[in-house]
Image (spheres, rainbow, N blue to C red):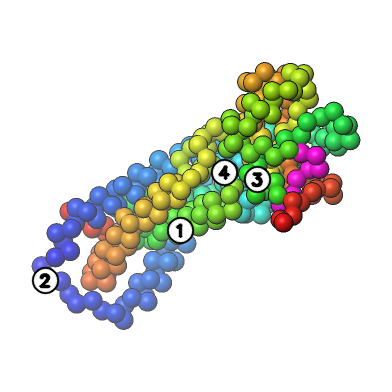
Amino acid sequence: MAERFGFVFFLARITLGFVFVYASMDKIFNPSDFARVVYAYKILPAGWVGLVALGLPWVELAIGLLLLAGRLVWPSALIAAALLLGFSGAIGYNLARGLNFQCGCFSTAQDAQAANLMTLVRDLALLVPVFLVLVEGLRRGLNRPADSDRPPRS
Amino acid sequence: MAEEPLNKNTIPAFLVRQVLTSLLIVALALAAGLAVNRARPDRFDPFVDWRAAEVEAGYRRLPEGVLGVKFEEMVRLYRRSDIWLADARPAEFYSLGHIPGAKSVPLSEAEKVLPALLEKMPRAQLVVVYCDGSACPDSFRLARLMTARGLRRVAVYLGGIEEWEGRGMPIVRVTGG
């Protein structure tokens, strides 16, 4: 029966892939601007900011490309889940304490709009396709170990 | 093709394999990021003291017509009685601690409160705006709003409350009644 939803899983994987590749671009080209955004979250120790700002976009790019290519889909979706939960937690925490900060999700521009509740909702909404990919990947991985990393196909 | 039944005994092995693969992807991505950064002509130093670097960088991206004030200058200005100090942070943060003498002008309410505040203020009044620290954009935006309303001497103290308090300067808390 799950085969009937093959297109939904395919769409979830491709959507996530595009979102993560797109999200990584501006940050990869402007690491110091992204570091400023990360610093403004006031969550990480100052000494970690540069390393996170430099590495995080590359992790996003890697999982985005892997999701698009349909390779290592399950571990990529697992990383996506961890990232989205982390982002949502950080955004929610900062919104709760009234901090005025930029999301840095897709743009590092200095005058980008400040993060708000919709930013948090969007990040949480992206967990839905991640969940779909994880569940389907788990089912397929357990049923067909030799094919465990293949994405669901329509 | 008929599906095989789920074998729950394979779940831990599957998860361990996938988590290890995830860690490998992250490690390789980080290595790629560091390698590309090393090759860039405008190499970014990930181990820089970000706080100090950000303060310095802030002075280079001040809005047009807005001055930058460094810590030593801020201390000197603070001891003068003729400056007008504005705290651009949300009111809750102002209550938790602000520079003595500063007025609370939260950016979110600036459009509403600025006309009345600036009505009797001479255009040449020296105004210093600050917020949390170098990375918070509120002081820039408030300064820009003030210059747009005709004030000629608006400055941003980029170190903000973070540097001010961190350097042992006095702050005032608003205690609830």
- Between circles 4 and 1, the one closer to the viewer is 4
Residue B55 appears in the figure = no
What distance separates the C-alpha of mark 4 from that of mark 3? 15 Å
The residue that appears at 23% across and 58% down in the rendered structure is A152
Q: Residue at label 1?
A: A85
Q: Amino acid at mark 2?
A: Ala
Give A12 or B25, whichever is nearer the viewer: A12
Q: Main secondary structure of the magenta part?
A: loop
Magenta stretch in the rendered image: B96-102
Placement of B144 over or under A153, stated as above or below: above
What distance separates the C-alpha of mark 4 from that of mark 2? 52 Å
What secondary structure is marked by label 1?
helix
Give A16 or A105, whichever is nearer the viewer: A105
Q: Position of residue A146 (x, y in %)?
A: 26, 67
Left or right placement of residue B82 versus residue A54 in this view? right
- Between circles 2 and 1, the one closer to the viewer is 1
Q: Amino acid at mark 3?
A: Ala
Quick one: which residue is furthest to the left in this view? B1
Quadrant showing the C terminus of chain B = bottom right
**Does label 4 or label 1 sit earlier along the sequence?**
1
**How packed is label 4: few (under 14 Cα within 10 Å), some, or many (20 or more)?**
many
Quick one: which residue is furthest to the bottom in this view? B9
What secondary structure is marked by label 3?
helix
Point out which mark residue B2 bears.
Answer: 2
Placement of B175 over or under A101, stated as above or below: below
- CB-based contact (under 8 Å), mark 2 and mark 1: no
